[in-house]
Amino acid sequence: GEDDGWDESQPGGLNWHLEFTRAISAWQLGSSAASISVAVIDTGFDIEQADHRGHDDLRGVFVPADSSAADGNFNSTNPHGTHVAGTIGATGNNGLGVTGVAWHARLLAFRPHLRRQDIQAHIRLAAERGAKIINMSISQVWEGEPSFDEPRYYGPLAGVTLEWTRFLRTLPADLLIVQAAGNNGRDARWSGYANSIPSGSGLRDRIITVAALDREGRIEQGAPAHCGRVTA
């Protein structure tokens, strides 16, 4: 990643997010995550660029892990997964592109349909491929604008919660799921999937829900204003 100077006490410039999260201090303990496999479940990847033309700081660590991509092709007009993969594992201190948090991590790319059952199948496959961390910068789409004030949504949300609670209990206990809180300003539980798991389930320590902050530490507009039982 490109270096524009580092100062954790005054986050700024292109690297402010790494300064804000004190990644530089963490790297003093070790910056290589070569022994860790991270699955990136997302809507699209630019695998060709990662391997051949651009994105040199992802070369050799960013690999397609699923031969049954949603349309049979990992390369997408919406390569959101490449962006996410760079945030996770782009090599730093090399003057190329961006700097990720966990340099040299093995990144496994999965591009499923966004149905719950298909995502669960890919999570299980990722665990079988050795992933210890699964990143899902995706959220569930509901009809209309769901609200906890409307009883008609209680049943569907309860169904999602029960389904995912049962599913997570079948996964290895050391598997960590990192999921986006959503971009619509609603309670994070409405972003669905693993975020719907309640705190009393005993499973919340396997899930990290991520919301966007600005450099002042304020929740960004569009990120959930209220995360309920979800930690963001």
Image (tube, rainbow, N blue to C red):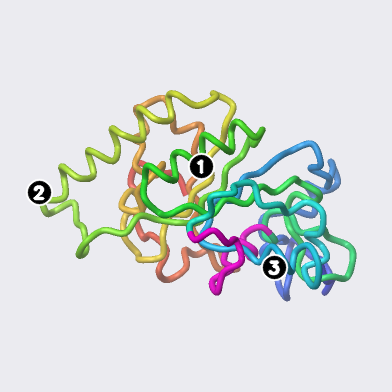
What is the spatial separation of the Cα atoms under label 1 and label 2, in whole angstroms?
Answer: 32 Å
Q: Front-most of 83 and 31?
A: 83
| Three-letter code for the amino acid on which mark 3 is drawn | Trp
Q: Position of residue 169 (x, y in %)?
A: 42, 24
Q: Front-most of 34 and 231?
A: 34
- Residue 122, labelled with which disc? 1
SS for callout 2: helix
Left or right relative to 175: residue 155: left
When the figure is inspected, residue 203 is found, relative to residue 218, above or below; the finding is above
- Residue 51, labelled with which disc? none
SS for callout 3: helix
Residue indicated by mark 2: 151
Asked which quadrant contains residue 146, the reply is: bottom left
Quadrant of the image containing the N terminus: bottom right
Q: Position of residue 132 (x, y in %)?
A: 64, 34
Label 2 crowd (10 A; few <14 / some 14-19 / many >=20) = few
The tag earlier along the polypeptide, 1 or 2, is 1
Magenta span dominant secondary structure: loop
What is the spatial separation of the Cα atoms under label 3 and label 2, in whole angstroms?
Answer: 42 Å
- Residue 16, labelled with which disc? 3
Residue at 75% from the left image edge and 68% from the top image edge: 98
| Three-letter code for the amino acid on which mark 1 is drawn | His
Q: Is residue 110 magenta?
A: no
Q: Position of residue 2 (x, y in %)?
A: 83, 71
Q: Are marks 1 and 3 in contact (CB under 8 Å)?
A: no
Left or right relative to 33: residue 190: left
The tag earlier along the polypeptide, 1 or 3, is 3
When the figure is inspected, residue 29 is found, relative to residue 63, above or below; the finding is above
Q: Which residues are magenta?
A: 71-85
Depth check, mark 1 against mark 2: the one in front is 1
How many numbered dots are placed on residues in this image?
Answer: 3
